[in-house]
Image (spheres, coloured by chain):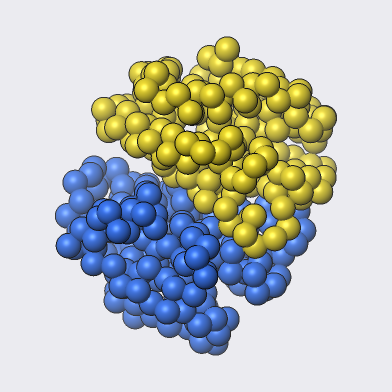
Chain colours: A yellow, B blue
Amino acid sequence: MKLYDLELSGNCYKVRLFCALNNIPLDIVPVDYLAGEHKGSEYLAINPLGQLPSLDDNGLIIRDSQAILVYLAVKYDLINWWPHGAIGQALIMQWLSFSANEIARGPNDARLHDLFEVPLDVAEARDKARAVLDVTEATLQDSNWLVGDKVTLADIACFPYIALAHQGGVALDAYPKTRAWCERIKMLNGFITMPGIE
Amino acid sequence: MKLYDLELSGNCYKVRLFCALNNIPLDIVPVDYLAGEHKGSEYLAINPLGQLPSLDDNGLIIRDSQAILVYLAVKYDLINWWPHGAIGQALIMQWLSFSANEIARGPNDARLHDLFEVPLDVAEARDKARAVLDVTEATLQDSNWLVGDKVTLADIACFPYIALAHQGGVALDAYPKTRAWCERIKMLNGFITMPGIE
C-alpha cells in the first residue's frame, strides 16, 4: 500500500501512526507541498481535492485521513479500534467528525496559519482550538480514552492536531487530562512521532 | 428514540430524512435555537458541544448527524446504506468527512450567514461552496450516486446543504449533474422535505 504523504501533516501522521501501532507496512510516497505538487495535475488525478494523505491499495484510492483509518481497521479486522456494533461505531464516529470539523477549524487551522502562513483568522482558530480542548478535557475527566476503556480510532484521529496545538499558539497547560491522554498515546506499543511532537 | 431537532437545520433534516426513507419512528423534540436553548444548561447536559441534532435512544446519547446516521444504519442492519466491508465503509466515510468539513465550511456556513446572520466571511464560504459543487459535479459525471450504483449514507449526508445552497447565495445552475442527483434523491420512496427544499 502506498501512502501519498507529507511529513509535517498531522492528517498524514495519523495514518502513519495507526499503521505503526498495528504493524501495517506502508510505502511512503512524499508529496512536495511547498512546491505545490498536491495541486499539480498528476496528484489531482489521484485526489481531486488536492489534499493529503491519499492511500493507494493496489489501485483503490482512498482519500481523507478518517476514511483511511476506517479502511485499514476494517480491512485488517481490527475490531478493538473500530468495532462492528452500532454503539461503538457511532461513539467513535462522533470523534471522526470532530476531527474533520472542530479540530480542522481549531488547532489545525491555527497551525496552518503559524507554520505555513496560510491566510486565515488565527484568533478565531485559536478560540476554536480552546473550545476543542474544553471538550476533550471534559470527556477525559473520568476516562483514559475518548470512547470506552480502550484506545480506538477516535483517539488516533484526534491526537495529532491536539498534540501539535502549541505550533498554532495554543498551549495545553490548562488541560491536564488532555496532556495525560497525549502521554498515554505516546506510551502505546509501536508509537512513532513526527516533527513537533516530543 | 428522541431526536433533539431544529426544523431549519440541514443536519437535523438529514436524520429525519434517513428515518423517513427507512420507516424508523422518531419522537421529535424541538429545540428553540433562536432563543439559545441549544446553549442552555439543560441541553448542554445532553450535548456538551451545544449542537443539533442529538439522538437519545433509551438514554444512549449520540451527537453529530454523521454519527447518528451510522448508528441507525448499523442498529437496523441497513447494509445497502452502510455496508460491512472495508471498501464500502471507506468510500462512504470520505463523504461523511466531506460533509463534516468541506460542506460545513462551504454551503452550510454561507447559509448560516445569510439566514441566521452568523458573522463570518461569506465570500470565502461561497468560494468553498463552489469548490464543493465542483467535486460533486465531477463525481456525478458518470454516476448516479456518490458511491457505487445505489444511494448510501454518503448521499444523505451531503444532500441537505447542497440542496439548500441557494439560501447561502450559491445557485446550482452551473451544476446540472448535481441538480439531477438532487432530483433523484427527491424521487426516493418515503422522501420528506424541509423548508427551502422544494
Q: Residue at x 64, y 18 (%)?
A: A193
Residue A37 in percent (x, y) is at: 57, 26
Relative side of A71 to A6, left or right: right
Hey, which quadrant is residue A121 in on the image? top left
Q: Looking at the image, which is closer to me, B31 or A126?
A: B31
Q: Residue at x 61, y 17 (%)?
A: A194
Hey, which quadrant is residue A80 in on the image? top right
Relative side of B194 to B135, left or right: left
**Image quarter (top left, top right, bottom left or bottom right) of the C terminus of chain A:** top right
State whether residue B174 is above or below residue A140.
below
**Image quarter (top left, top right, bottom left or bottom right) of the N terminus of chain A:** top right
State whether residue A193 is above or below residue A149.
above
Q: Looking at the image, which is closer to me, B176 or A5?
A: A5
Residue A91 in percent (x, y) is at: 57, 53
Q: Residue at x 75, y 62 (%)?
A: B84
Relative side of B24 to A31, left or right: left
Residue A174 in percent (x, y) is at: 37, 23
Please, which residue is most extreme toward the front here? A142
Hey, which quadrant is residue A134 in on the image? top left
Badge count: 0
The answer to whether residue A57 shows anywhere in this view is yes
Q: Looking at the image, which is closer to me, A36 or B71?
A: B71
Q: Looking at the image, which is closer to me, A194 or B111?
A: A194
Residue B174 in percent (x, y) is at: 39, 62
Q: Residue at x 61, y 53 (%)?
A: B93
The answer to whether residue B153 shows anywhere in this view is no
Relative side of B94 to B172, left or right: right
